[in-house]
Image: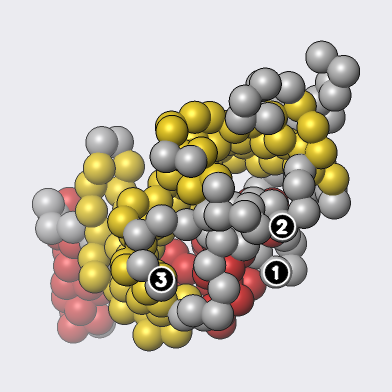
Amino acid sequence: MLLRKLVASSIVLTLLTAACSDEPVEADPEAIIALAIETMGNVDTVGFFLERTGAPIYIDEDNILEFTSAEGRFSTPESTDALLTVRALGIPTQVGAVQIGEDTWITNPITGGWEDAPSGFTFDVATLFDRTQGWSALLDGGLTNVHFTGEEKLGDETLAHYRVTAPADRIEQITAGMVAGQAVDGDLWIDSSTGEIRELTFNTDMADGVTTWSLRMTDYGAEVEISPPDLNG
């Protein structure tokens, strides 16, 4: 009986020591991914910022509108509005874009008026948040060579950092259709406590050189309402 009490006391003491220790608790990389799969499959609204540097990428068939960045919002099931920064014939300008289902409108770079998007316009961020084809599916077996590098404290958030390889079809989604047929290695950061993806960065090899991409996401769950633009305005 005395031996049992000593063993029990020893276990309790060990648990209390671990609980009170200043040593950080080791993160569970698989548990964080599992949480992210669930979280990203239930995103209703989110803000995003997609940025490109390096070799040029065009979003029209005539290679006139060179994509630089896009900042916007997503609302379920498949609506986005964004402000795209582009270079039109070498001149920096901004283009508004609204997508609701299969309909897409943009502002004319010259007049500023809203019009139907031209044929070949490739900007479809909504696919990232598709319930079956978006982030959740990508995290749930879509990524390969997943390597957890550790947790990083950034501001008030603790982010889990992974090195990953993303398949070509998902890179096409992440770049809103601007890059096709290319699997890439990249860096992925996930909020350890919520499972929200914060950032993904990667490089793509294009005809004119290497393009660097950065996708950041914020404001999960914010109130968002996206409506068709006034084409007569």
User: Which of the numbered marks, if any, corresponds to residue 133?
Assistant: 1
Judge depth for marks 2 and 1 and give the one in front: 2
Name the N-terminal-most of marks 2 and 3. Answer: 2
Quick one: label 2, few (<14), some, or many (20+) residues within 10 Å?
few
Quick one: label 3, few (<14), some, or many (20+) residues within 10 Å?
some
| Residue 81 against residue 162 in the figure, above or below | above
In the image, is 118 to the left or to the right of 189? right
User: Does residue 158 appear anywhere in the picture?
Assistant: yes
Name the N-terminal-most of marks 3 and 1. Answer: 1
Find numbered disc 2 in the image and state the secondary structure of the residue it sits on: loop
User: Which of the numbered marks, if any, corresponds to residue 120?
Assistant: 2
User: Does residue 160 appear anywhere in the picture?
Assistant: no
- At a point 41% along the width and 72% down the height, the residue shown is 207
- How far apart are the two marked residues, 3 and 1, measured between alpha carbons? 25 Å
Tag 2: amino acid: Gly
| Residue 146 against residue 105 in the figure, above or below | below
In the image, is 233 to the left or to the right of 128? right
Judge depth for marks 3 and 1 and give the one in front: 3
Quick one: label 1, few (<14), some, or many (20+) residues within 10 Å?
some
- At a point 25% along the width and 36% down the height, the residue shown is 155
Find numbered disc 3 in the image and state the secondary structure of the residue it sits on: strand
Tag 3: amino acid: Met
| Residue 94 against residue 12 in the figure, above or below | above
Q: Name the residue under label 3.
A: 206
In the image, is 193 to the left or to the right of 132? left
Quarter of the picture holding the N terminus: bottom left
Residue 31 drawn at (x, y percent): 45, 69
- How far apart are the two marked residues, 2 and 1, measured between alpha carbons? 22 Å
Find numbered disc 1 in the image and state the secondary structure of the residue it sits on: loop
- Asked whether the residues under the numbered discs 2 and 1 touch, taking CB atoms below 8 Å apart as contact, a structural biologist would say no
